[in-house]
Image: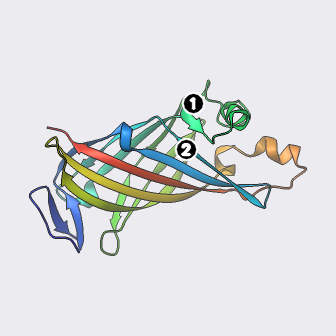
Amino acid sequence: MSEATPTSRILYGALVPLPGVYTLDPVHTFVEFVSQHLVIGRVRGRFDDVSGKATVAGDPRQSSLEVEIKAASLSTHNAMRDADLRSARFFDVEAFPTITFHSDKIVAELANHWTVEGPLTIRNVTHPVSFSLSIAGIIVDPWGATRVGIHARAQASRKDFGLLADLERETGGMLPGTDVVISFEAEALLQP
């Protein structure tokens, strides 16, 4: 386990940031996903426009995480597929421009591992999702800002958010796997 520094502390067997508000650095924050395609393959993609903040409390279990994703920033590196995913068949980015996550429970697990639970909203449909989160490190960067690295991963059902309805009809019920793996990689900066 790492040792506490002037920018961190050890609680629940984990290195945690000092209390404060940390905003996500949009240049170093990524939300990526992997979903099954036609039962045999996988599609990988990401959202490039992500913002939010982590409010770290004295007791880290009382902290919160808020993330907002611009749905139109979706990219799978295939223009035709991206246009389809942005359309009303899937994310319907014109009607529902944002995807949001707000934590409502944080549980300390084994050293440096946390469970962060809360509502994920896609297409104005909300379901609870549980992220496994770890702190990658806490540093003072070359410009004097306290920076925290965050890695998180969750699994959610595409069906829960209405993202498979057209595929069910088109394939005659031959559904791909309904689960999608969501990865959240972020750097957050302590606000003065």
Quarter of the picture holding the N terminus: bottom left
| Label 2: how many Cα within 10 Å (few below 14, some 14–19, many 20+) | some
Q: Indicate the amino acid at tag 2.
A: Arg
Q: Which mark is residue 27?
A: none
Mark 1 vs mark 2, CA separation in Å: 11 Å
Of helix, strand and loop, which one carries label 1? helix
Residue at the far front in the pictured view: 142
Tell me which residue sits at (49%, 54%) in the image.
183
Tell me which residue sits at (13%, 43%) in the image.
144
Of helix, strand and loop, which one carries label 2? strand
Q: Which mark is residue 46?
A: 2
| 130 relative to 136 in the view: left or right | right
Mark earlier in primary sequence (1, 2): 2
Tell me which residue sits at (57%, 30%) in the image.
72
Q: Indicate the amino acid at tag 1.
A: Ala
| Label 1: how many Cα within 10 Å (few below 14, some 14–19, many 20+) | many
Residue 126 versus residue 133: which sits nearer the camera?
A: 133
The picture quadrant where one finds residue 51 is top left
Report which residue position mark 1 lands on.
72
Image coordinates of residue 56 in percent, x first then y, are: 23, 51
